[in-house]
Image (cartoon, rainbow, N blue to C red):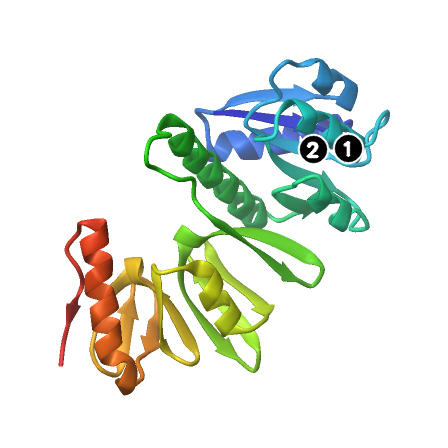
Amino acid sequence: MQIAVCDDEEGVRDLIARKVQGLYPQAELSLFASGEELLLKENAGDILFLDILLGGQDGMEIARELRKKNRKIILIFVTAVREYVFQAFDVGAFHYLVKPFEDTKFSEVLHAAVSQWEEECKGSSDRNGKTESQYLWIKNGGLSTKVRLDDIIYAEVLNRKITLHTKNGDLEYYGKLSELEKTVGEDFFRPHRAYLVHLKYVERYNATEIVMEKGCAIMAKQNYPEFVKCFMHYNQRKGQQGAYGWD
């Protein structure tokens, strides 16, 4: 795995490099002081931390040039200003970190980026019969976040605010659970008007409750027979042993 950092401030480059090495010491790390220097590199890496306010060409221009050479690079903008957030997603940015950022936030973003890179590697290594993971773009407060469907454990809604419980934490946004249900596909089931569960993460269930890998969802009794049917079908499709029910 190759991770690159492009920032015209040496202190920032070194700071990000130390954080990366602390989390992924096996990663191959490259540091660049300018966008022009970065563009001269034939391969900019798998994951790139890119400053927007560079001394020469700004980061947005650099990102557009990089996209012409490498559509798959996972791009994380690092900047002291928020004004470019919408432009960042126009060039397919994975995330947008605002300086100064906390260690927890940095770790969360980098772990998510590495997970995406690993998933894309799996997809490219086997093109016969396997499809790349699907994603959702969740918009909240002007910020868009890319979420793998496979990472969603379950969703719940309260007063039009949907909470996605994922393997990497919770995300909230305003929307309709019915629209999310249409998007996520047959690996999910809606046992109650306020809940949507990923069948992959069901651990046990009965006619009133579903215990997930993290958390619980309510089961409407009238939906129980259909849930059991869908859950059994899911396990047949995946060729695996299902969770168990209890009284």
Any part of residue 229 in sight? yes
Report the label total.
2
Does residue 188 appear to the left or right of 43 in the view shown? left
Pointer 2 with pointer 1, Cβ within 8 A: yes
The residue pinned by badge 1 equals 59
Q: Is residue 57 above or below residue 190?
A: above
Residue at point 43% right, 24% down? Answer: 26
- The quarter of the picture where residue 94 lies is top right
User: Which image quadrant: the C terminus?
Assistant: bottom left
Other-residue count near label 1 (Cα within 10 Å), few / some / many at <14 / 14–19 / ≥20: many
Q: Pinpoint residue 232: horizontal percent, then vertical percent.
A: 19, 63
Residue at point 82% right, 31% down? Answer: 58
Residue at point 14% right, 55% down? Answer: 241
Residue at point 31% right, 84% down? Answer: 220
Q: Looking at the rendered structure, which numbered label has been put on residue 50? A: 2
Q: Pinpoint residue 106: horizontal percent, then vertical percent.
A: 58, 44
What's the amino acid at mark 1? Gly
Q: Nearer the viewer, residue 213 or 224?
A: 224
Any part of residue 164 in sight? no
- The quarter of the picture where residue 189 lies is bottom left
Circle 2 sits in a helix, a strand or a loop, which is it?
strand
Circle 1 sits in a helix, a strand or a loop, which is it?
helix
Spatial distance from mark 2 to mark 1, Cα to Cα?
7 Å
Mark closest to the chain's N terminus, 2 or 1: 2
